[in-house]
Image (cartoon, rainbow, N blue to C red):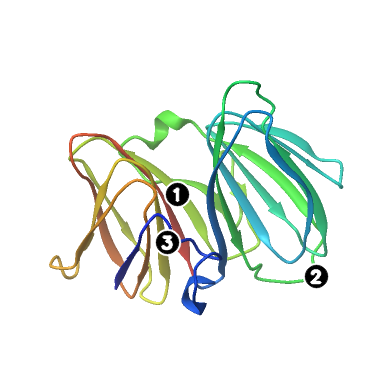
Amino acid sequence: MIRVDPKHTRIGRGPGEDDARFGPMRVCSDDVIAPRGGSGSRAYAELEIVTVAFGGKLRYEDDLGNVAVAGYGDVQRLSAGTGVAFAEANPSDVEPAERLRLGFEPAEKGLTPSFETASYDPASLVGDLVPIVTPDGGPNEASIRQHLAIFLSRLPAGETVEFMQGMDRRVFLFVVEGSIYVTNVGDPTETATLRARDTARITETPDLKFTAAGEEEAFFLLVDLP
């Protein structure tokens, strides 16, 4: 089943219980941070927080002593564990910063907090689904304490990419730029269109095909969830 949510509906911000969670997913928030803007220090616990930068620069600092600046091509993962406080700011005087923040329940609670930044090659995203977060991590992947993976893809106009998973798993989609058609390969009559900043929640659909709609490149994020 493919459920499309308009760009004004976000996990953790919707009016009903169904909008508050999707499997272990608790937060989906896309934001543009003004030059010299940001948020003060806030405390978190028992949450896996992933930040994907899409434009500009973001400076992260926490009470564990971690400091990092992320831009497009970087992904940050904070395992809040037993508790950590962090602040985030846009250090630029002129350029806004764009990022997507995702939050997930950890597979195990009571763990020591940790922070990680991973970098990937944006050129590798063209025509493919590239993992940027996985349970074990890797050279171009951040690790996470949950049985999930996060992928990015850039599809030239008209091109397609497929994704397969187990019947008991879920897919969450977020379109960064452009538009995509999402098709249930098992039942091609089930097709949905997502435009920039739209999201979708997909269940019981193990074989999916994504096609860049229109005449522009499509840029989207996929989360493979238990």
For this rendering, which residue is in front, 37 or 135? 37
Give percent across and percent down for residue 42.
78, 53
Q: CA distance from mark 2 to mark 3?
A: 27 Å
Q: Comparing marks 2 and 3, which lies closer to the viewer?
A: 3
Rendering quarter of residue 36: top right
Q: How far from the left and from the top, in percent, is residue 141?
A: 57, 44
Q: Which residue is located at x 25 percent, y 35 percent?
A: 156
What residue appears at the point 48 percent right and 31 percent down from the top-left corner?
A: 121
Which amino acid type is shown beneath numbered disc 2?
Answer: Gly
Report whether residue 141 is seen.
no
Q: Nearer the viewer, residue 156 or 166?
A: 156
- Quarter of the figure with residue 182: bottom left
Find the residue positioned furthest to the top.
94
Q: Are marks 2 and 1 in contact (CB under 8 Å)?
A: no
- Mark 1–mark 3 Cα distance, whole angstroms, equals 10 Å
For the residue marked with disc 1, what is the amino acid? Answer: Phe
Tell me the SS state at disc 3. strand
Q: CA distance from mark 2 to mark 1?
A: 27 Å
Kindly identify which residue carries mark 2: 110
Marks 2 and 1, the one that precedes in the sequence: 2
What's the residue at 73%, 34% (across, down)?
A: 68
Judging from the image, what secondary structure is the residue with disc 1 in? strand
Three-letter code for the amino acid on which mark 3 is drawn: Phe
Q: Are marks 1 and 3 in contact (CB under 8 Å)?
A: no
- Label 3: which residue? 172
In the visual, does 59 lie left or right of 131?
right
Q: Which mark sits nearer the N-terminus, 1 or 3?
A: 1
In-front residue for pair 37/48:
37
Write down the residue under mark 1: 151
Image spot of residue 159 (x, y percent): 21, 41
Q: Is residue 211 above or below residue 187?
A: above
